[in-house]
Image (cartoon, rainbow, N blue to C red):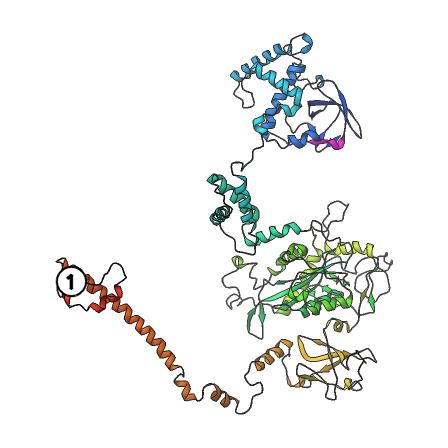
Amino acid sequence: MRENRGELSAGSMVLTDDGTAVVVHVDRAGVELKDVRGAVSFVEWPDLRTAQPIDGGEPTASDPPALRSLAEVWNRLDDEARTETLQRLGIVQEIATGYRHGHAELALPGEPSDLFDPALGATLSQRCARMAERLSHEARTSRSSNTPAAITSRSLHLWMSKWQDGGLLGLVDGRRSKQVEVFATIPLEWRLAASDVVAELDGDLSTVNLGEIHRRVKARLKESGLDIRPPERAAGRYVSHLKRSRGKTTRAQRSNKLRGVAGVESYPAILPGQMVAIDVTRSDAMVWCPTRGGSCSVEIISAMDVATRMILALRVVPMSADSHDAAMLLYDVMRPFSQVVEGTSVSDWAWAGVPEQIEFYADEPAADDDCSGVEVSCPRTCRRLHTARSLQGTHVIPGVQPSAVRADHGSIFVSQVFRDLLNRFGIDLPLSRTRRPVDNGILERYHETLQRGLQQLPGYKGRNVAERGRIVGTPQAHRDEPLLTAQELEKFLRRWIVLDYHRTPHSGLRMPGMEAIDMCPVEMFDAMLKLTGRLHVPQRPDMIYDFLPVRWGSVKSTGVEFEDLTYDCRGLDGLRNVPVGMFRAKDAAMPFHYDPHDMSRVWFRHPDTGHIVEVPWRKSHLIDAPLTQTLVRELRGKIARRSTPRLRRTAAEDEIIAELGSLLDGVVPKDWRKRIGAARLRHDAATRDHTEAAVAMTVADAVEAAEGRQQPGAPPPGQADEGEYSIWADSWPFEPPRDDA
């Protein structure tokens, strides 16, 4: 039988705690083993392990399996220790039994030897002496490294005693099995202080070098009244070990700090739509902005089904994504799409119909069901997605209603707008832990896979500055290959998702209990449909308005007003000046849906018909450019920052008089006195500096004259003004002259 690459049969050898044993009988539950003393015992298969291979020695550790109780300790020894121990085992077993392996069934040529056969009456001392002579002879005549050195009879007696008391492990050299404390020479108090100092490096503060850590340890010990000076080299190694364990960079330190609260199990998603992960990443390919007339960066926001790894939605948005972009992504998640490939023509994602609900059945398809296209309103049952198996045909991107959405703590995901949207659909929001991207690791890994598609595009700039080219983003780089626009980038990525990513085997898709076969996301989705039976996804043509934020406004005779913009249309007739409590109890306001990216109109659902009615801005016909909420707020902010919000014809003139008095006054600053005072101070300081230098030179000339080294043209010492030296009265090395000089 085979156990961990080792074949066991009757007559095979096994390492045990007592040495070698021979297999007497093999059973489906285990084996019977006979030790060197002739005792037979039964060992179950789980108690057998294969020892680690070693080089040299006879027998080698890679040949015989070992008992689990022995293997756990045996495999912790190094190769040299195991080889030496097996050599000793062969020697003592030959002394004890006459056989090197301890059993007649495992006899080597020429065994049993007359020198060591206990049946011939030789005593243990005689056999030990004969073995010592043989080993001495082998040591003199052999140059092999595997030949043991000359060993005395006394040493062999000691080996026999250790083998009888401790078995195989008793023959291990104590010096090789000794567990040495690496930092035993460092006092415990110093190690504790060093651990506390290094523990403060948690990523929040800037990291420091090893020298600063040593200084902090010394300072902390001194504050505690301890004067400990450990061995310098050992202390350096210990601090390096602590710093390496903590993390070299602040990012690694933060990760190690949070590892204590990290989960050890993945989310148990076994159904499509049970958990949808969403995240945003910056596009590593530049795009062309027609409005600016230059290149710019955008972001990619994606949604992935955790159970099947299918990308359910993808959008390219300007930097940076907002909560409405996240809401529109969720809107795409709940809509099924299809993409058609005909020859070399590839369509964009198309919303695949809008019935009351879409059902993906898990029953067998009808015999005439070709499953070649997407007919979401088709009443026929199908157990798989109606998607093409080859590149040509119709490919389906399923829509699901998530039970939960996994996201990080980005402001767009924790915003009240996004939370209200999830509450509206009854979707949970299990956020990742702060600064733990591994909680949403499958989508973070997908961002790396996305590089496979982005690298095909012009304007690819790499993941970081180290990968970035010199001319990326310049007109020279894209003279022959123009950049894609944001819309073209989104269209390309959606093609890549359906035709490449969804049809590529994914190493993370493994069915428990099955052989290791990499499945692609489409295959996994089909397989899991067997568990769900059908997927219910609400579908309506006006479903998008369920994903828009709501504002409450009272409709007057002139319409409804939001942020100083008035909206009106004929659809509001009959709803102007409604009574209090018609839509909500506290006032006469009614709910309107609005799009933060398009403030030129709002929408409401008519209470009588249930249809969505568009209410345009009264002046929307006067503009061609889109009016966004960002632009409106920016303009309102500029007006609010004015000193006079509403400008009059004389506003500029009044502002000049209020702040400048007159334009002439502005030519000569009103604070000229203050400015002259500052200039005066700067002038006095310069004068003082030059005076000090002049005095110093005069004193030096006086000293030289007193010593008879007066330079030509130098004034006599007595002619110097004594007052000039007063500032040096307390300055070294100059002293004021005395009266008797």
Give percent across and percent down for residue 162.
63, 20
Residue that appears at 50% across and 64% down: 471
For residue 130, say whether it is visible. Answer: yes
Q: Where on the picture, by quarter, is residue 617?
A: bottom right
Give percent across and percent down for residue 526.
78, 56
Q: 34 above or below 304?
A: above
Q: Is residue 51 magenta?
A: yes
Q: Amino acid at mark 1?
A: Asp
Range drawn in magenta: 45-55
Mark 1 element type: loop
In the rendered image, the quadrant that contains the C terminus is: bottom left
Front one among 613 and 169: 169
Q: 511 above or below 292?
A: above
Give percent across and percent down for residue 345.
69, 65
Residue that appears at 12% across and 58% down: 708
In the rendered image, the quadrant that contains the N terminus is: top right
